[in-house]
Image (spheres, rainbow, N blue to C red):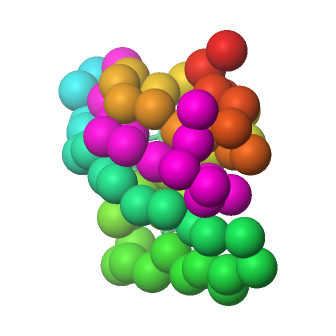
Amino acid sequence: MTNGSAIQVRGLRKVFPGGVEAVAGVDFDVWPGEVFSLLGPNGAGKSTAIGMLTGTVAPTGGSARLAGFDVAT
Ligand SMILES: Nc1ncnc2c1ncn2[C@@H]1O[C@H](COP(=O)(O)OP(=O)(O)OP(=O)(O)O)[C@@H](O)[C@H]1O
Ligand SMILES: [Mg+2]
Protein backbone atom coordinates (compact mmCIF):
# COMPACT_ATOMS: atom_id res chain seq x y z
CA MET A 1 0.00 0.00 0.00
CA THR A 2 0.93 3.62 0.02
CA ASN A 3 2.25 5.93 2.69
CA GLY A 4 -0.78 8.22 2.29
CA SER A 5 0.51 10.02 -0.76
CA ALA A 6 -1.84 10.66 -3.69
CA ILE A 7 0.93 9.73 -6.13
CA GLN A 8 3.88 7.60 -5.07
CA VAL A 9 6.73 7.14 -7.56
CA ARG A 10 9.72 4.94 -6.82
CA GLY A 11 12.61 4.19 -9.14
CA LEU A 12 10.45 4.90 -12.17
CA ARG A 13 12.43 4.32 -15.34
CA LYS A 14 11.86 4.25 -19.09
CA VAL A 15 14.21 3.06 -21.77
CA PHE A 16 12.65 3.37 -25.23
CA PRO A 17 13.34 0.79 -27.94
CA GLY A 18 16.59 1.95 -29.47
CA GLY A 19 18.12 2.61 -26.10
CA VAL A 20 17.19 6.18 -25.11
CA GLU A 21 16.86 6.31 -21.34
CA ALA A 22 14.13 8.94 -21.06
CA VAL A 23 13.50 8.57 -17.32
CA ALA A 24 16.45 7.35 -15.30
CA GLY A 25 14.78 6.23 -12.09
CA VAL A 26 12.88 8.94 -10.27
CA ASP A 27 11.34 9.05 -6.81
CA PHE A 28 8.73 11.48 -5.59
CA ASP A 29 5.49 11.75 -3.67
CA VAL A 30 2.57 14.06 -4.33
CA TRP A 31 0.51 14.55 -1.22
CA PRO A 32 -3.26 15.04 -1.15
CA GLY A 33 -4.09 18.67 -1.87
CA GLU A 34 -0.56 19.48 -2.98
CA VAL A 35 0.16 21.36 -6.20
CA PHE A 36 3.13 19.61 -7.79
CA SER A 37 5.19 20.86 -10.75
CA LEU A 38 7.46 18.74 -12.92
CA LEU A 39 10.08 21.04 -14.41
CA GLY A 40 12.97 20.35 -16.74
CA PRO A 41 14.57 21.27 -20.07
CA ASN A 42 13.38 19.91 -23.41
CA GLY A 43 13.92 16.17 -23.54
CA ALA A 44 14.29 15.79 -19.79
CA GLY A 45 11.61 13.12 -19.70
CA LYS A 46 8.63 15.01 -18.31
CA SER A 47 6.07 13.81 -20.85
CA THR A 48 7.40 10.26 -20.63
CA ALA A 49 7.05 10.36 -16.85
CA ILE A 50 3.48 11.67 -17.06
CA GLY A 51 2.75 9.07 -19.74
CA MET A 52 3.78 6.35 -17.33
CA LEU A 53 1.45 7.81 -14.68
CA THR A 54 -1.48 7.99 -17.09
CA GLY A 55 -1.01 4.58 -18.66
CA THR A 56 0.11 5.55 -22.15
CA VAL A 57 3.78 4.60 -21.64
CA ALA A 58 4.78 1.25 -20.17
CA PRO A 59 7.49 1.63 -17.51
CA THR A 60 10.75 -0.25 -17.93
CA GLY A 61 11.18 -0.42 -14.18
CA GLY A 62 10.21 1.00 -10.85
CA SER A 63 6.70 1.67 -9.69
CA ALA A 64 4.01 4.32 -9.62
CA ARG A 65 0.89 4.25 -7.47
CA LEU A 66 -2.11 6.55 -7.84
CA ALA A 67 -4.36 6.54 -4.79
CA GLY A 68 -2.74 3.24 -3.94
CA PHE A 69 -3.26 1.59 -7.32
CA ASP A 70 -0.16 0.42 -9.19
CA VAL A 71 -0.29 1.79 -12.75
CA ALA A 72 1.36 -1.41 -14.03
CA THR A 73 -1.52 -3.56 -12.85
N1 LIG B 1 8.28 7.28 -28.30
C1 LIG B 1 9.59 7.56 -28.15
N2 LIG B 1 10.52 6.77 -28.70
C2 LIG B 1 11.85 7.01 -28.53
N3 LIG B 1 12.35 8.04 -27.83
C3 LIG B 1 11.46 8.88 -27.26
C4 LIG B 1 10.04 8.69 -27.38
N4 LIG B 1 9.40 9.69 -26.68
C5 LIG B 1 10.38 10.45 -26.16
N5 LIG B 1 11.62 9.97 -26.50
C6 LIG B 1 12.91 10.52 -26.06
O1 LIG B 1 12.93 10.47 -24.65
C7 LIG B 1 13.55 11.64 -24.10
C8 LIG B 1 12.56 12.34 -23.19
O2 LIG B 1 11.50 12.87 -23.99
P1 LIG B 1 10.21 13.57 -23.34
O3 LIG B 1 9.31 13.87 -24.46
O4 LIG B 1 9.69 12.73 -22.23
O5 LIG B 1 10.83 14.90 -22.72
P2 LIG B 1 10.11 16.23 -22.20
O6 LIG B 1 10.78 16.57 -20.90
O7 LIG B 1 8.63 16.03 -22.17
O8 LIG B 1 10.52 17.30 -23.32
P3 LIG B 1 9.74 18.65 -23.80
O9 LIG B 1 10.05 19.72 -22.78
O10 LIG B 1 10.38 18.95 -25.13
O11 LIG B 1 8.27 18.34 -23.91
C9 LIG B 1 14.02 12.46 -25.31
O12 LIG B 1 15.35 12.09 -25.57
C10 LIG B 1 13.09 11.98 -26.42
O13 LIG B 1 13.69 12.12 -27.68
MG1 LIG C 1 6.99 17.06 -23.08
From what the image shows, is residue 41 above or below residue 13?
Answer: below
From what the image shows, is residue 11 above or below residue 50?
Answer: above
Residue at the image point whose x is 30% and y is 40% from the top:
11
The reply to whether residue 22 is visible in this rendering is no
Q: How many marks?
A: 0
**Relative image position of residue 66 (x, y in whole percent):** 69, 44
Foreground pick, 23 / 2: 2
Residue at the image point whose x is 53% and y is 50% from the top:
3
Foreground pick, 34 / 15: 34
From what the image shows, is residue 60 above or below residue 66?
Answer: above
**Is residue 9 toward the left or the right of residue 50 in the image?**
left
Residue 72 picture quarter: top right
From what the image shows, is residue 17 above or below residue 49?
Answer: above
The reply to whether residue 21 is visible in this rendering is yes
**Relative image position of residue 27 (x, y in whole percent):** 34, 54
Residue at the image point whose x is 62% and y is 70% from the top:
31
Q: Give the residue furthest to the top.
A: 73
Q: Which residues are magenta?
A: 1-17
Quarter of the C terminus within the rendering: top right
State yes or no: residue 12 in magenta.
yes
Residue 45 picture quarter: bottom left
State yes or no: residue 5 in magenta.
yes
Quarter of the N terminus within the rendering: top right
**Relative image position of residue 56 (x, y in whole percent):** 70, 33
